[in-house]
Amino acid sequence: MEIKPYRHEVKYYECDRMGITHHSNYIRFMEEARVDWMDQLGFGFDRMEAEGVVSPVVAVECRYRQPSTFKDVIEIMPSVAETTALKLVISYTMTVGGHVVCTGTSTHCFMENGRPVSLATRFPDFYAKMMECSKNE
């Protein structure tokens, strides 16, 4: 399955007084890309939550490489970095014009009725698509 990168155009309000994208926005960009990625896999957060499963973020990390500025289009490519029965780590590579501006990861668990749930057991089709995607990248 081919996944297309998520594209985010930096808005003026996302920049600091130096004219560069404020560091806190990259976490939001990762979330936007994650939501888009899951939609591309055919299993969006809206569907998952409608079926009673939530996906809290348990850790997040960003490494800033180069600044981006107002009107830059950041392409964000998520991929599966690690998965276990109860945990998913997604990595993100963010580029502007082919240059890496930021890399990061977000770690998630999945819960149903307040208890951990295995994606492989609860949503085997989604899990298979996700794993297929990770093998291709």
Image (cartoon, rainbow, N blue to C red):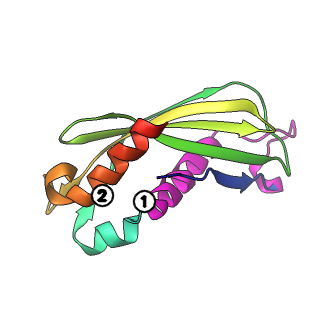
Q: Pick the residue in front: 66 or 125.
A: 125
Please identify the dominant SS of the magenta region: helix
Q: What whole-number distance in Å separates the C-alpha atoms at marks 2 and 1?
A: 7 Å
Residue 35 position, x and y percent, is 48, 59
- Image position of 23 with respect to 28: above or below: above
> Which of the marked residues, 2 or 1, is nearer the chain's N terminus?
1
| Residue that carries the numbered disc 1 in the rendered image | 41
Give the residue drawn at x 30%, y 58%.
Answer: 126
Q: Is residue 117 visible?
A: no
Element carrying mark 1:
loop
Please name the amino acid that badge 1 sits on: Leu
Kindly check if marks 2 and 1 are in contact, taking CB atoms under 8 A apart as contact. Answer: yes
Mark 2 is surrounded, within 10 Å at the Cα level, by few (under 14), some (14 to 19) or many (20 or more) other residues, namely some
Number of numbered discs visible in the structure rendering: 2
* Residue 69 sits in quarter: top right
- Left or right: 1 in relation to 22: left
Residue 108 position, x and y percent, is 33, 44
Is 18 contained in the magenta span? Answer: yes
Is 31 contained in the magenta span? Answer: yes
Q: Pick the residue in front: 31 or 42.
A: 42
Residue 28 position, x and y percent, is 57, 50
Q: Is residue 75 visible?
A: yes
| Residue that carries the numbered disc 2 in the rendered image | 126
- Image position of 129 with respect to 87: above or below: below
Residue 33 position, x and y percent, is 55, 52
Stretch of the chain drawn in magenta: 12-40
* Residue 8 sits in quarter: bottom right
